[in-house]
Amino acid sequence: MEAKLEFIAGGGITSPNGFRAGATYAGIKKEADDALDLGILFSEAPCKAAALFTTNRIKAAPIVLCQQRLQAGRAVAIVVNSGCANAFTGEQGLSDAAEVADLAAGNMGLSSEDVLVASSGVIGQPLPMKLVRASIEQIVLSQEGGHELAKAIMTTDTVSKEAAVRVRVGGGEFAIGGIAKGSGMIHPNLATLLCFLTTDAAVNVDFLRLALRKAVDVSFNMVSIDGDTSPSDTVLIMANGLAGGEPIAQGSGQADVFQQALERVCIYLAKSIARDGEGATRLIEVNVKGAASVADARLAARTVVGSSLVKAAVHGRDPNWGRIVAAAGRSGVEVVEAKIELYIGGTCVFGAGQQPPFDRGGLVKVLGGDEVSISLNLNLGTGEATAWGCDLTEEYVIINSQYTT
Amino acid sequence: MEAKLEFIAGGGITSPNGFRAGATYAGIKKEADDALDLGILFSEAPCKAAALFTTNRIKAAPIVLCQQRLQAGRAVAIVVNSGCANAFTGEQGLSDAAEVADLAAGNMGLSSEDVLVASSGVIGQPLPMKLVRASIEQIVLSQEGGHELAKAIMTTDTVSKEAAVRVRVGGGEFAIGGIAKGSGMIHPNLATLLCFLTTDAAVNVDFLRLALRKAVDVSFNMVSIDGDTSPSDTVLIMANGLAGGEPIAQGSGQADVFQQALERVCIYLAKSIARDGEGATRLIEVNVKGAASVADARLAARTVVGSSLVKAAVHGRDPNWGRIVAAAGRSGVEVVEAKIELYIGGTCVFGAGQQPPFDRGGLVKVLGGDEVSISLNLNLGTGEATAWGCDLTEEYVIINSQYTT
């Protein structure tokens, strides 16, 4: 089916029809004057909803609540806070998460069961419920409010992450929008702290779950900042169907274009997260091809992009390519030394079993760019994958040694 | 069997009878004036020998050579250099490694097959054979030369690592000595770059292999500096039998005390490596008990000690204990939030499902010590393990962004 897919300039989570959002400063974050830390996403029409959560055995209270409520595949709104993860907070945490949903539901005239909750921030501290109770009714929902919500979920992020695409297909159109936050504790699987996606497409809930998993696999699960994963990782999508038409289902005419559009939004947000890794000065993109399998390609790409030594070398613009092949070798995937071809920013630094002559000064310049591309051909099969990360800087250490004190 | 086991003051790899060593500066390392970068370990009597090598799929040339020569379980000498890993160097690297052994064998009047080779340093550069050929005959072997050899294997290490124990048992005695280098690219499995061990005990080669594997499992495999492993990781033991007596074998009277002594030396060296991790200012010891299995305890301990966020928090003396439990949760082992007890330096920071009141200022002081002890009781079973690592500092990033340039 012919389709036209374009990014919406300045688009975000409220770009699809029928979604509104807003945020306020409740005082949960101890931050700058213009900080926001509590927000709501709301849909005019009930949504099909699907989500993926952290693989961490310790799950934050909001995730426990969301997992229960999402069994029916339905949601209308979600309340999000930053500054406190409400993780490792026991029974009190669960009851606080439920109360947050109750408060928001009361204000919006919804059933509490239709309201989800997400939190991000410091682990092991109770959610300051007095602040939440005092502030939640101040949130004003609007069609422009998506930008505020994107800011309200930030913790150590330096910029908010937003994207939206519009798809014209078969005489109709729909949009997919999203916001995300990341920065630290970002690693496969589910390499994000929080990502919320919206669409006005009508989508069958089983297909929505499947499409989300596939999109996350090629985006958020291919990002590594520091090897840690958090108890709060959440990727959620809500589809309100206001674009009309038959619900898109597995195998239906618009399934492929929906999948493609969703992946575009997720990859855009995932790259934004990698680029804004704590202390990062540049985005690293690692493409592995010629692997024995896609699984091998994924593992090798993620291992290289997650290697502290590779990340530090890129930071120092050090063409120390041996660390890249050493990381690929450590990943456990099949590699044959003599078959490997390695390119940094288009320059071959290893191939045919040896190091060809290359312009070292030119390579140092390439490594100093905003985006550094590493391309590894294992020449063993057809498996291919791309992963994203960032350089490791002194600033990362400074940020993470001063987080709670 | 009653046994007395004591560390030898100032002891090292030439403490056991019949071992001699020496080193010289060949110019492979571009270092300070008193640098050493090429050395030899030699035994007066042929040794039973066993070794464990990197699990990295890319293996340095010296490892390929050692794996071939160690099939017979015999060795007399080993030549070691730092400054160049001779890794990812193809056929040339293999032929260079063999020539290094040939040169040393010629000087010492040995069969080349009895000489092993090990290298550590930059990956992907050919070994500068002209320098090796010009310098190798300058190496003078002596009973005090173990200290020189310990220095000659250092790369970014700030101090050399040496240890030896003497064991008195059943009317006789034997010694076990060792040297190691580490610093970066240190992670399970085989968390070391190079470790050489010697003993004058008579040991059956099958038991020697078994004992080495067990000792490495509780020492070098429980150390994490930066999550990377190198293509050069080698732990080698040589037993020359000069202490006399029946060879120690699996199940024989002295097997347990030999195992215990070997583990003491390996753990001492492993902790020295962790303490001297690149840029490290303090040693972190993580003890996990009450795990569902030993495998779970090992995995949880290694994941916590390897977490960038935990390491950065310790560096900043930040009692951000949530990162510790989050890392344990991410490790994939069985954990039940309400059962966890977590202690930092003896202070309980989480237990019985909640955070007890604790002296935050006192904890900040504990985190500022030379050694930080983290103790996690999962209260699920009897599995226990200890892992070692170091804090993550700005200095680590600086060292690793300027390595080859």
Image (cartoon, coloured by chain):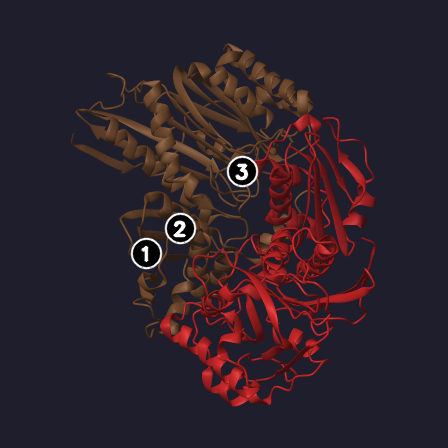
Chain colours: A red, B brown
Compare marks 1 and 3 and give the one earlier in the sequence: 3
Amino acid carrying mark 3 in the image: Met
**Disc 1 chain ID:** B
How far across and how far down the image is residue B42, in percent? Answer: 45, 20
Locate residue B395 relative to residue B209 in the image: left or right: right
Badge 1 density bin: few <14, some 14–19, many ≥20, Cα 10 Å:
many
Which element type, helix, strand or loop, lies under badge 3? loop
Q: Earlier in the sequence, mark 3 or mark 2?
A: 3
Q: Residues within 10 Å of mark 3 (few under 14, many from 20)?
A: many
The label number, if any, that marks residue B378 in the structure image: 1
**Do discs 1 and 2 belong to a common subunit?**
yes
Whether callout 3 and callout 2 share a subunit is answered yes
Q: Examine the rendering and report whether any part of residue B32 can be seen.
A: no
Q: Which residue carries the number 3 mark?
A: B154
Q: Is residue A271 left or right of residue B329?
A: right
Q: Residue furthest front?
A: A246
Reply above or below: B239 against A163: above
Is the Cβ of the residue at disc 1 closer than 8 Å to that at disc 2? yes
Q: Percent from the top left, x then y, of residue B215? A: 36, 34
How far across and how far down the image is residue B294, in percent? 33, 44
* Above or below, A284 relative to B231: below
Residue A87 placement: quadrant = bottom left
Identity, as a three-letter code, of the amino acid under mark 2 = Val
Q: Residue at x 55, y 86 (%)?
A: A109
Q: List the residue tagged with mark 2.
A: B333
Callout 1 and callout 3 share a chain: yes
Q: Which mark is residue B199?
A: none
Give the residue type at disc 1: Leu
